[in-house]
Image (spheres, rainbow, N blue to C red):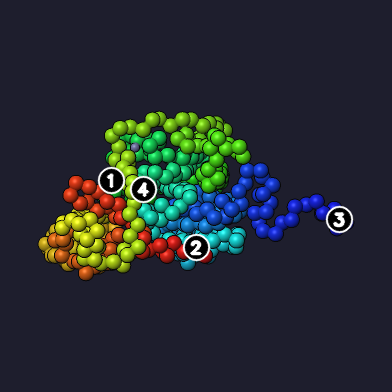
Amino acid sequence: MKKEDFLFEPSINTRDDVYELISWWKKDKVRNAKVMVIGAGALGNEVLKNLALLNIGNILIVDYDTIEFSNLSRSLLFRENDANNNALKCSIAAERVKDLNPEVKVMSLNADINNGIGLGVFRRMDAIIGCLDNRLARLSINRACYKLRKPWIDGAIENLAGQSTVYVPGKSCYECDLTEREKKMIRRAQACMNVANRSIVRGRIPTTPISASIIGAIQAQEALKIIHNYDEKSKEAYFETLKSKIFRYEGKTIDIGVYELEDIKEDCDSHYYYDEIIEANELSHNTTVGELIEWAQKTFNESEPEIPLQQQFIYELIQDKSENRISVRLPESKVREYIETNNLRTDFNEEVYLKGYHYLTIDFPFKELTLKEVGIAPLEIILIEIEGAKKYVELTGDSNYLNFK
Ligand SMILES: [Zn+2]
């Protein structure tokens, strides 16, 4: 072939030049997009692979798990050595995404979505993708996204089957779709989460790389649509989306369908909106409780502001058999680890009772502790209750916390 034969080829200098041949593709929108992928298991691996190849500019990976040998059969980003090293899923996934496409920026957070990710992180994302294996984590994402009126893309797989949905606050809701039995299972998981074994919370569902790649691809595709955000009036493109719909795939029988979700219910704990968020540059997760209370007193001219905590702050553990009391300063999510490390359960039947605070008030005795130490995540949006009103205050001083590389 002569050199001239290539003259009419488009010039391909960056990886996404080729996508510009797609009429509706907006390179800048894709390159500037921030997408959060929650869960880096089988589904997460597939979603991340697609996002990396699509040149999605900024990818945030959230997971708290380590890589086990059993993950290798369904996770193209992980290697045997990662399992041998007990490496963190989020860090290895970030490394491999960067390896797949050095043009994208990545950040990983080794955190539990139920209490470790501030709402301000959600707020800064263009698309939020749940790649989870348990209902409690899905419920946490649903509630966070409702508060901010942001859609989120759910995916679930089992065996050769899978499904994906885009929940849109005000129109569709993960919590509304739950059955009473499922809600009961979530409550049990919630009770177990902090003091018992995490494996109770985690599902044990047999999955395949086939359903993971099909559903992961659908989720990445929906993220691409949300990033472009074309509506019916747009001349460039109009997409049918999975907003308030469910895509179902059953590989055994090759049944594929898209169905409308049921309408939302009236009485549901997820339907709670944080409108009018106050950005407080002077507050961060390193602010002390005392400073926060003073700030609220001054800002809202209120002598007794009350700040409800998402998770209890524990100051005492009581062993039931010996009635031995141990002083601690821990958010509830760290108690389980503390009990295990210090062998506080002398035998299997030993119960350890927790004493703690649900609110930060002027009477809170540990005002020298930082917000991080009482269990408030960086970039959190804190609810402050003052006489007859609720204020939503972001720890905007944590803005540098999001750092894609
Ligand atoms: Zn609902």
Residue at x 30%, y 52% (from the top left corner): 392
Using the numbered discs, state the Cα–Cα distance from disc 1 to disc 3 in whole angstroms. Answer: 68 Å
Using the numbered discs, state the Cα–Cα distance from disc 2 to disc 3 in whole angstroms. Answer: 41 Å
Q: Which of marks 1 and 2 is nearer the N terminus?
A: 1
The reply to whether residue 36 is visible in this rendering is yes
Q: Which of marks 3 and 4 is nearer the N terminus?
A: 3
Using the numbered discs, state the Cα–Cα distance from disc 3 to disc 4 in whole angstroms. Answer: 56 Å
Disc 4: CA contacts within 10 A as few (<14), some (14-19) or many (>=20):
many
Q: Residue 188 carries which label?
A: 1
Quick check: marks 2 and 3 in contact, CB under 8 Å?
no
Give 131 or 274, whichever is nearer the viewer: 274
The residue that mark 3 highlights is 4
Looking at the rendered image, the disc whose residue lies closer to the viewer, 1 or 3, is 3
**Element at badge 3?**
helix
Image vertical order of residue 317 relative to residue 239, above or below = below
Image spot of residue 289 (x, y percent):
23, 64
Q: Residue type at mark 2?
A: Phe
**Element at badge 2?**
loop
The residue that mark 4 highlights is 144
Using the numbered discs, state the Cα–Cα distance from disc 1 to disc 4 in whole angstroms. Answer: 21 Å
Q: Residue type at mark 1?
A: Arg
Disc 2: CA contacts within 10 A as few (<14), some (14-19) or many (>=20):
some
Image spot of residue 209 (x, y percent):
55, 47
The reply to whether residue 344 is visible in this rendering is no
Residue at x 36%, y 53% (from the top left corner): 119
The residue that mark 2 highlights is 404
